[in-house]
Amino acid sequence: MVACGVAEWSLLTNHARVLLCIAHDPGVRLRNIAARVGVTERTAYGIVTDLTEAGYVVKHKDGRRNRYQIQAHLPLRWPLPVPGSGGLAAVGEVLALLAGDGAAGLSARDEGPVIPLADGSRTGTGHD
């Protein structure tokens, strides 16, 4: 039974949810991504591979583990206009909005790197 008329679907795709996991913890393990997103490890691996091949994520070896770096400056696959700016949203802007202060390196309030965008602005929350 569906409570309060909420459908059994998610507003975010599994790819977006994996990006959020990586934004929160760039050293996250595939098994933890799978558990958080609710998919198998094989599916999580496939999604990370999709994101890597598309250029949204870069993998770096750190000993026996991987660390991930989101290419926050890249545009979304489907253009999303930013009202009042005349530009289109970048991946980092959407992740910063969805993740709030928890996205490492994506918010201007974090101590991690702030990513400059193509239009000269920077990712963040407007609290520069």
Image: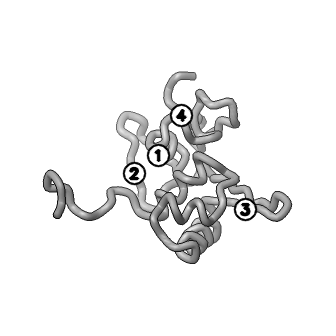
> Alpha-carbon distance for marks 2 and 4?
22 Å
Local crowd size for mark 1, using a 10 Å CA cut-off: few (<14), some (14–19), many (≥20):
many
Helix, strand or loop at mark 2: loop
Foreground of the two, 91 or 42: 42
Q: CA distance from mark 3 to mark 1?
A: 21 Å
- Cα distance in 3D space between marks 1 and 2: 10 Å
In the image, which disc is placed on residue 94?
A: 1
- Do the residues bearing badges 1 and 2 touch, measured as CB atoms within 8 Å? yes
Label 2 vs 4, first from the N-terminus: 2
Q: Position of residue 23 (x, y in %)?
A: 59, 48
Mark pair 4, 3: CA separation: 23 Å
Q: Is residue 99 above or below residue 42?
A: above
Q: To which residue does mark 2 refer? A: 80
Residue in the image at 49% along x and 63% along y: 15
| Tag 3 residue | 59
Residue farthest to the left, as pictured: 5
Q: Position of residue 75 (x, y in %)?
A: 52, 54
Residue appearing at x 60%, y 72% in the figure: 45
Circle 2 or circle 4, nearest the eye: 4
Q: Residue at x 69, y 36 (%)?
A: 113
Q: Amino acid at mark 1?
A: Val
- Which of labels 3 and 1 is toward the front? 3
Q: Classify mark 4: residues with Cα within 10 Å, few (<14), some (14-19) or many (20+).
A: some
| CA–CA distance in space, label 4 to label 1 | 13 Å
Disc 3 to disc 1: CB gap under 8 Å: no
What distance separates the C-alpha of mark 3 from that of mark 2?
A: 26 Å
In terms of secondary structure, where does tag 1 sit? helix
> Which numbered disc flags the more N-terminal residue, 3 or 2?
3
Question: Tag 2: residue type?
Answer: Leu
Residue type at the position of mark 4: Asp
Identity of the residue drawn at 55% across and 53% down: 21
The residue tagged 4 is 101
